Image: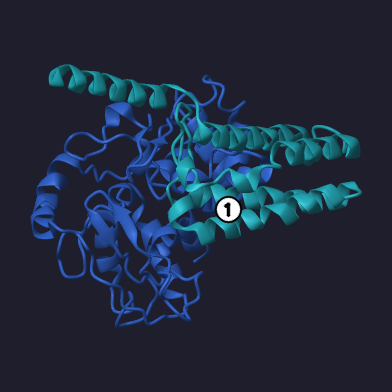
Amino acid sequence: MQLLTKSLFAAVAGLMIVSSAAFAGPADDAIKGRQECMKANGGAMGVMVPIIKGEKPYDAAAVADAVGKIEAACAGWSGWWGDNTQKGETLETWAKAEIWTDKAGFEAAGAAYGPALAALKASADEAAFKTAFGGFGGTCKNCHEKFRRPKE
Amino acid sequence: MRNGERLYNAAGCHSCHLPGPDAAGIDGALPAGGAPLKTPVGTFYPPNLTPDPETGLGNWTDLEFVNAMQRGIGKSGRHLMPAFPYTSYAHMKREDVIDIRAYLASLPPVKNATRPQEVPLQPVVRRGIGLWKLIGFDSAITQPDAGQTDSWNLGRSLVDGPGHCNECHTPRTAFMTSDMSRYLAGGPHPEGDGKVPSLRGLIERGRYKDANDIKLALQNGELLGYDKLSSGGMGKVQTNMSKLPDADVAAIAEYLASLK
């Protein structure tokens, strides 16, 4: 009897471990949010870089649209970095441990992003856009250098 | 001296020899040393490269400098730890190394004694380096390939020499020597977190459109939305590349684009 209880308990515990590893949870939700936000940034780059390179003409409406998509995708940012989000239940993340061991540094790097995006949004002509874009790309690099793991 | 500054940037000297976080009052742009460099064998505090006689290179002769840069032998005659990439710098032309020395000597001297390395097995490891050099240290100076353009040859000499791309982008054998059969083919990150990408087939694998695309990526990084050149230490490399003359970066890109 005791053996049966024990093995039942082990089976249930085992199942719990398996299920926690196999199904999405709160960390996945946060990681998904982060990754969607980054994708919106990547998408915006796809719109803006050709203008910077001179491959496409400056298009204020397209820039505004790209910035709007970032704002929508990244609205939940501040809630996505809890201590329990260092690893996903099922999703892989390239977030480095330094985000949580150097919280002040991470917040400082992140804090530069908001004004950089706002400057992009406020830019009313091509010259202003180009200036704002330089600051924007710089904040990406500044944060990725310290807080994102390299991936192939 | 101009050439020395150019190669100082190409070699990324400052990326490791920068002042540490505790160095109060030292200009962070100078290679005054001391910032911790974590490696699998322990933590290094790269030394002061400014011309201060006591704590920097002020009392070093050109010969001692070349011996360190290209033979991995310190002023005291000891083997230097290959966290300092002399295995790559060995491929440089002697006069280029002397030019770096002249540039360093032109910097303002800074008094900054750096901490000793924290390498637990140091006596054993240091003895091992002599043997390791016998099997893994190719000290041949890069010779031009007559079948290639001047620019391609310049690119290769920058990649294999000062650029020391191999140190991270070529995987290592069990003996910690570069596995040249997998030249620049990527592998585990030497700091143990993540992967270092392969630099072969960059065009064929669709990573970049052409050599000019690689050039723009090296010069601009995320300032032009190239988001693969920031992580894992590459951000510092890209910053260094942005300081190089246009023709040098074009040459590096031409050479990398040719690696299948």
Residue at 53 percent of width and 42 percent of height: B229
Total residue callouts: 1
* Chain the render paints blue: B
Q: Is residue B220 visible?
A: no
* B71 sits to left or right of B98: left
Q: Is residue A90 visible?
A: yes
Residue on which disc 1 sits: A142
Instruction: Quadrant for residue B213, please give it.
Output: top right
Q: Quadrant of the C terminus of chain B?
A: top left
Judging depth in this view, the residue of B114 and B144 nearest the camera is B114
* B208 sits to left or right of B44: right
Asked if B184 appears above or below B9 in the picture, the reply is above
Asked if A43 appears above or below B59 in the picture, the reply is above
* A139 sits to left or right of A94: right
Mark 1 neighbour density, 10 Å: few (under 14) some (14–19) many (20 or more): some
| Whole-percent x, y for residue B62 in the image | 30, 69
| Disc 1: host chain | A
Mark 1: secondary structure: helix
| Whole-percent x, y for residue A15 in the image | 33, 20
- Coloration mode: by chain
Q: Residue furthest front?
A: A1
| Whole-percent x, y for residue A73 in the image | 71, 36
* Chain the render paints cyan: A
Instruction: Quadrant for residue B127, please give it.
Output: bottom left
Residue at 46 percent of width and 33 percent of height: A88
| Whole-percent x, y for residue B219 in the image | 60, 46
**Label 1 sits on what residue type?**
Asn
Asked if A4 appears above or below B242 in the picture, the reply is above
